[in-house]
Amino acid sequence: MRVLLIGSGGREHALAWKIGASPLLTKLYAAPGNPGIGSDAELVKLDIADHAAVAAFCQEKKIDLVVVGPEGPLVAGIADDLRAAGIRVFGPSRAAARLEGSKGFTKDLCAKYDIPTAAYGRFGDLASARVYVQTMGAPIVIKADGLAAGKGVTVAMTLPEALAALDACFDGSFGQAGAEVVVEEFLTGEEASFFCLCDGVTALPFGTAQDHKRVGDGDTGPNTGGMGAYSPAPVMTPEMIDRTMREIIEPTMRGMAETGAPFSGVLFAGLMITDKGPKLIEYNTRFGDPECQVLMMRLKDDLLVLLNAAVDGQLAHTSIRWREEAALTVVMAARGYPGTPEKGSVIRGVEEAAGDGVEIFHAGTAINGGALVANGGRVLNVTALGKTVGEAQKKAYAGLDRIDWPQGFCRRDIGWQAVAREKAGS
């Protein structure tokens, strides 16, 4: 098979690494990719926002499958445009990608199909949103309706914080994404990420993980796109997975089909496991980042076979095998993130850090004058396998400490909840 991978982050490097291991693969292209992806794929200078150019490339190179990594192109309808050109695509249609592209759309779907989620209000103007927030009080959650690179959500513990978050949305801090807001009830419990491969009819469970959104140790500081993750998530017991499928995923699949937008691709449910069971926080319509990195490390089966089964509507006849080991990834970010990151600093020791169950996935890197440099906020994902989360954590940090990058930083407590559970059980 000849495959084109769309994207340039750590998630896409993990996908390229796993797709590259498939015996089915004859050629892997990546657009635009990054220096790490370049070791697994041929990088292509394509404007991925120009869907006609992407389609022309696929036809010229006889591409058998396009795998779309990030959410932006999916919400913009790249899957529809490629399918219209006769090209097979793994990823949802523009209409189905509304599950991520509009938080309000998803909340309304939940209300219609009795999917457990936080109570909410939708607002298109600041005044009515302020009245609702002042009536409900804090803690409360403020979300920009559209895509905001993981930064449009504020968990406000005080009323002034909530009102400031509303101001940020409506004053254009998140662009068009903040033109409408969703205000949600604050849920308590433990968060988890749950993934399914979907083919429009069948949703096949595809692993669990737990992300760390806050920038600082102890879950402090502002939200980020994710500072680390581990898999599996102990809170997602077999019983909890069964409830999530029955109460959340299956009614979503049914609802999307009934609205004329059957969901095909990756359905990523961000969950809060409350004392009453799982509740949906949000949907994403692609693999998580950095959750994808730990899932790819644990996946035993050929990813390309699974992606083809989803595209061809064959997931009802498919199963997935996982390694027994746990996986953990730590994000190395550039100073300044999640604000304005400092770019251009030289990174050394990446190759020496890999090996013995440790993989380094590139996220925001570039080559400048022959040197590897930082070129984004989240820059590297140091990812390890271990018999336990604790062992994977030790291996990941040992690998990370071999990287020479003074301008980078990371959290030192990724996996802390799972490690505490392991210690309590020992």
Image (cartoon, grey):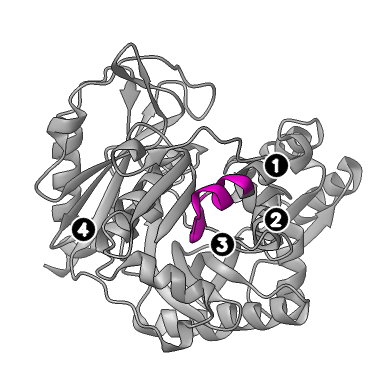
The kind of residue on which mark 4 rests is Val
The first of marks 2 and 4 along the sequence is: 2
Reading the image, the residue beneath label 1 is 162
Reading the image, the residue beneath label 4 is 389
Find the distance from the CA under tag 3 to the CA under tag 1. 40 Å
Q: Nearer the viewer, mark 2 or mark 1?
A: 2
Find the distance from the CA under tag 2 to the CA under tag 4. 42 Å
Q: Quadrant of residue 177?
A: top right
Reading the image, the residue beneath label 3 is 89
The kind of residue on which mark 1 rests is Ala
Q: Residue at x 53, y 21 (%)?
A: 340
Would you say residue 319 sits in the magenta stretch? no
* Image quadrant in which the N terminus is located: bottom left
Dot 1 alpha-carbon crowd within 10 angstroms: few under 14, some 14 to 19, many 20 or more: many
* Image quadrant in which the C terminus is located: bottom left
Contact check, label 2 and label 4, Cβ < 8 Å: no
